[in-house]
Amino acid sequence: MFISIQEAISQGKGNVALRGWVYRERKSNKLAFIVLRDGTNIIQCVIEKDKVSSGVWSSAEKVMVESSVTLEGEIREDKRAPTGYEVGVTDLKIVQTAERFPITKDQSTEFLLDVRHLWLRSRELTTVWKVKSAILAAAREYFEKQKYVEVTPPIITGSSCEGGSTLFKIDYFGEEAFLSQSAQLYLEALIFSLDKVYAITPSFRAEPSKTSRHLTEYWHCEGEAAWMQFDGLLDFMEGLISHVCVTVAEKCSAELKLLGRNSDDLKKIVPPFPRITYDEALNILKKDGIDVPWGKDLRTEEEEQLVKHYDKPLIVTRYPKKIKAFYMKDDPKNSEVVLCCDILAPEGYGEIVGSSQREENIDVLKEKIKNQGENIEHYNWYLDLRRFGSVPHSGFGLGIERIVRWFCRLETIRDAIPFPRTIKRKTP
Ligand code: ATP
Ligand code: MG
């Protein structure tokens, strides 16, 4: 019976039957080494010509990188082997002999992206997918514990949420439709029957510029809760992010280490997180010699400078109303700013969350829609939510790949998703 490489390593001795792909191979007259890979780990396997049948030796001679194989042999500890164990092979069968693998050392990023369907087998990227899976599982676990209901909002929509400039238009049977930028408006509709909901869906943004933190298709984790006010929102997000950090640090410490991240960094991400207002952020920046005029949004460089002062995610609240979306509620103490919050990752990985308390009063909301130059007709159904049992409520959106990039210390967000979609790339 086949077992996984990880199970074989845990077993540590005796006979094992393994299957997988050839990660590396090296041959001489009498010896052949294969590093075998499966979904769990890699292991060195050695074939000695004198100890195996001529059929097995001829398979060993034919084997190419990325060939699929099954093998049997005895596993033993070997300190020199890449994962500390080696299999002395007694039987080897090739399932498919791979053609010459196009990926070798020192190839250009563009080429590697062209063969992404093959490149994603690399050890580094495989490890990233595992960390990402743990992040998604930990997020779901937190929502479930807090009694949030997972819902499935639409991807094809008739209206926008985050503004027209980054909207993808599609031809919908001759009519105009859009790919969802955020599920927020739909989640708001669902809280009136479920109280607390969340969704993990793709969001689409026609991001016009090439940056290391923007994809045109990314996975968006959004939560919305009836009765939740601004302070409750901040506490909830702090709890969620901390839970994801601590859980993934524990579960994936080996994976994180392989990617150059010490999991202790993430174990330290526990509440309370530093909380500052937009105004305080401007003061800090001013002391650092950076002048941002009041009313301007914070740019990447400014966010990077701000987070240098902290080693936990930074909560920045109460941005000027004029740079934020129409649905955000005014701060009752200062109507120039709204009850919103961005959370910035440590170490300069940028914004990971956008959130706010929502405006629940229909007249104020209509005014806000008009002031932003939007057509009120497009929001008829949304305004119904303020006509039938409106309540105070809040919600947020967290970019999964932004978290992955931070945890895995990735230079670019492209490597946080198997098939990145960017301004220049939609294949493979
Ligand atoms: P940014 O200023 O970085 O473009 P945003 O203000 O447009 O972000 P929101 O509209 O608040 O972002 O979206 C919520 C979250 O979704 C962001 O905090 C971020 O984590 C994530 N996000 C937004 N746009 C992208 C993108 N193009 N690629 C990946 N993640 C994104
Ligand atoms: Mg944006």
Image (cartoon, grey):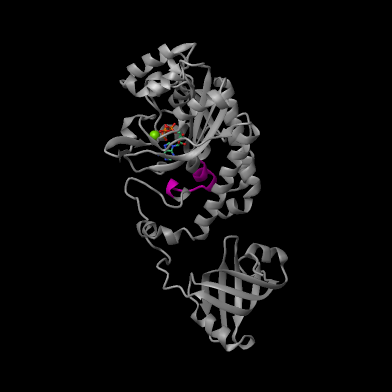
- Toward the front, the furthest residue is 173
Q: Tell me if 213 is positioned left or right of 197 in this view.
A: left
* Camera-nearest residue between 109 and 179: 179
Residue 242 coordinates in the image, percent (x, y): 61, 36
Tell me the residue at 59%/86% (across/down).
49
Residue 200 coordinates in the image, percent (x, y): 51, 39
| Quadrant location, the N terminus | bottom right
Residue 249 coordinates in the image, percent (x, y): 63, 45
| Quadrant location, the C terminus | bottom left
Q: Quadrant of ligand 2?
A: top left
Tell me the residue at 57%/88% (across/down).
54
Magenta span contains residue 404: yes
Tell me the residue at 28%/35% (across/down).
175
| Helix, strand or loop for the magenta stretch, by majority | helix
Position of residue 401 relative to residue 53, above or below, is above
Residue 28 in view (yes/no): no
Q: Which residues are magenta?
A: 403-414
Magenta span contains residue 167: no
Position of residue 240 relative to residue 47, above or below, is above
